[in-house]
Amino acid sequence: MADGIKDKVAILGMGCTRFGERWEAYAEDLATEAFVECLEDAGIEKKEIQAAYIGTHIDEINVGKAAVPLGVALKLPYIPVTRTENYCATATEAFRAACYSVAAGVYDIVLALGVEKLKDTGYGGLPSGGSMGVKPFMMGANMTAPGMFAQLATAYSAKWGVPMEKIKDAMAHVSAKSHANGALNPKAHLRKVVSEDQIKAAPMIAYPLGLFDCCGVSDGSACVIVTTPEIAKSLKKNQDIVKVKALSVSVSSGEEAIGNTWDGAHFVTTRIAATNAYEEAGIKNPREDLSMMEVHDCFSITEMVTMEDLHISPKGGAYDDIMGGFYDLDGKVPCQVDGGLKCFGHPIGASGLRMLYAMYEQLLDRVPQERKVKNAHLGLTHNLGGMPHSNVAAISIIGID
Amino acid sequence: MAGICSYGGYVPRYRLNRMLVYQAMGWMNPANIANAGGEKAVANFDEDSITMAVAAGLNALNGMDRSEVQGVYFASTTMPYKERLNSGIVSAALGLNDHIRTADFSGGLKAGTTALLSALDGVEAKNLNNVVVTASECRLGKPASPQELIFGDASAALVIGDEDVIAEFKGSYSVTHDFADHYRGQSAKYDRQWEDRWIRDLGFDQFIPEAINGLLNKYSLKSDDFARVIYDCHYAAARKKLGKVLGIAPETDQTNLQAEVGQSGTAQSLVMLVNALEEAKPGDKLLVVSFGSGCDALYFEVTANIEKRTDREAISACLSNKAELDNYTKYLVWRNILPGDAGLRSEEDVWTRWSALWRSRKTVLGLWGTKCKKCGTAQIPPQNVCVNPECGAINQMDDYLFSDKIGHIASFTGDMLAASLNPPAVYGQIEFEGGGKMMFDFTDCNLDELEIGMPVSMSFRRKYYDEKRDISGYFWKAVPVKEVK
């Protein structure tokens, strides 16, 4: 009888590059940078790694397809290397594969690395088209990510009767909070404090999302080495062991996109993935039990509805928690403690592991006082890949005992 | 008896005030002040002669059983394809069945009436019934040319059959002349014309009477037997003179809509005919005359059936549904006269995968989806596995048409990041009455007028133009339904 991942896998080391417009770096350079930090943190040698997973999303301007680029870049000694790709949940999928490899007892020490080089497109935003297959050219809307996520706001306003002005206020608070957190983080892409008034006055990108409602498009890499809790304990005698508590993924069934039941104002997948993750981790009341979170704030409205979909704020009621500072750095459950996608940046294939890195450094008390979460013992990461009507939600929960 | 069973028309929503054009380009050709009155109808950036023909066709087919249509004849001198049957695209978009006769009529501007005559011949000979004849035009005049001011975009459609006709076909008379008043060569983008005086004095003044008198003599009629004389001539002075010479009373002289729409080429005389049918009474005799490389004159008599049609408006409904295009350069960019920079994002290569389009032709061109035989759930795009989680039946689908369904806006946005020739790109989810939901581009609307729940109808539009390979790709967009007052 399967009984889940809880406490079967431990994190031995992590690394994360500075995110940003890394004009000087290829994906291989970023991967190497994250790997060097990770290997040093793990305190092992490269040859001890028995298998690896690489997460990359965009084929055209990154390292292309397959896992071979990672083996070649890091000179991994002919071990199995596999590529994972699942939109913005790509890195979390690499992590999940690495964890399952260890939990299955097949390998002792496994690497997962996410990397994305986006700033070779020549224009703002993500590249469109190409990666979606043949059909959207024939029958898809002329859409971009901001426009697809912006629709959450129009549908949310209609569903809950919340006026757009209030939604704009909450979205502005979400972004201002992430800017404040990101400004404290030397590895973050955007490091400027921005006021809620500035946010609301910014040029429109996709109604009702303005410039500051959209996350940074960045280059970066993050990686992790996982092992069994026993091996971790033997190698890290004098520190807490960060263990995996839950790994949960839910993928759209088509009902949201073409069925007649979805309201367009929430993520069906996130709700299901969250319920499953809490059950796996044995969390009864996430609002009380979670210490902190890194969620998929690709757009401020995404973060707003995600607070409800993670079953922390009441449905239709995120506004009060957000405006009340519940998710601020000094709030009850701080969210986006490193700046989030919004300010730390969003290199698609690296983001899931970057979120995990933020939780990991908090759990091990490695962050300066100014951005420290008090009594951090349980952290949640949440990725949302794809579009609100058709997506993958991936949740990881890690913690120290 | 063969005749017209139904009519439809379409004038694009945007109108360009001719004085705006003159203010921009009059310095180059000051004499154009003579053509600078009124406004011209301008196709939206996502419209062309095919999409406008479909709009008129859908208007004409409204309420008719589409499975009974046996042919589509499409006339235009501005068809997007030289090779690839344009009427085949129109037919698929009209949701007609595959086993019908289709043909493109082009060359001279009288091709619209020639298509009509061909359909009438086919029906009279009992070879065909219920033929959709549509003429649609989107001609370009070079900036500062008279044509730029004179031309307008419009389309008309008639269903030709032999049962319950609203106007019986009584006879015709044709004249053909290789009179090159206007011409375009193999690769010409713009119309070229000879001197106005020659076109007027030799062309209109001679050929219109030649055709009309030919018909009157053939059927022993007089011009005042007709309730409406519908003839193509955009020169106001020439019209005045012709009216006198031919004895056409001003009240029977059907307006050419030059001040509201502009000269619409092959569609011109049929747009005027549709406009006349909106007001026609049983017993009215109508004379229709085209002009261009000769003339076709056709004679119809309106029957009592016309009073059975509940919604008489077609062209006039479009005339009242208009939006001012208050920007001449926007018009130039839309017609690719002024190649504007829509950003690097717009330069991503769009490949038309013909084999995939063939597979998806019913959905892409006709907006067909599927309906589950087991649970009745409508779904688009077509699915193998039923989306209803309580059902999940596999390969139990019937074809189901969405193009004629009303939808409602479930979510929307106006996107400034998406590459568009009319930013912001407005799109959102549409939920159809009767079931089914899909993300669509919206068109012919303003972002600030949109609301969740607002009804929309579906409109066939050009989705993209691949300049490198000269391909126009089509799909359906949502258009907010105008409030009926």
Image (cartoon, rainbow, N blue to C red):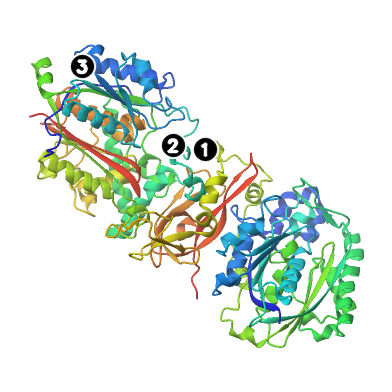
Same chain for mark 1 and mark 3? The answer is no
Give the residue type that dot 2 points to.
Gly
Task: Residue A113: name its quadrant.
Answer: top left
Same chain for mark 2 and mark 1? The answer is no
Q: Are marks 2 and 3 in contact (CB under 8 Å)?
A: no
Q: Which mark is residue B425?
A: none
Q: Which mark is residue B345?
A: 1
Q: Which residue is mark 3?
A: A41
> From this viewpoint, is residue A224 visible?
yes
All told, the count of numbered labels is 3
Q: Are marks 2 and 1 in contact (CB under 8 Å)?
A: yes
Q: CA distance from mark 1 to mark 3?
A: 41 Å
Image quadrant in which the C terminus of chain A is located: top left
Work out whether residue B415 or residue A257 is closer to the camera in this orientation and state it.
A257
Q: Between disc 2 and disc 3, whose residue precedes?
A: 3
Q: Is residue B351 left or right of residue A371?
A: right
> Does residue B372 lie above or below A126 as drawn?
below
Residue B187 percent coordinates (x, y): 76, 45
Graded by Cα atoms within 10 Å as few (under 14), some (14 to 19) or many (20 or more), the crowding at tag 1 reads many
Label 1: chain? B
Q: Which element carries disc 3, helix, strand or loop?
A: helix
Q: Which residue is mark 2?
A: A125
> In the image, what residue occupies the spot 16% across and 29% down?
A103
Residue B457 percent coordinates (x, y): 49, 64
Work out whether residue A384 or residue A70 is closer to the camera in this orientation and state it.
A70
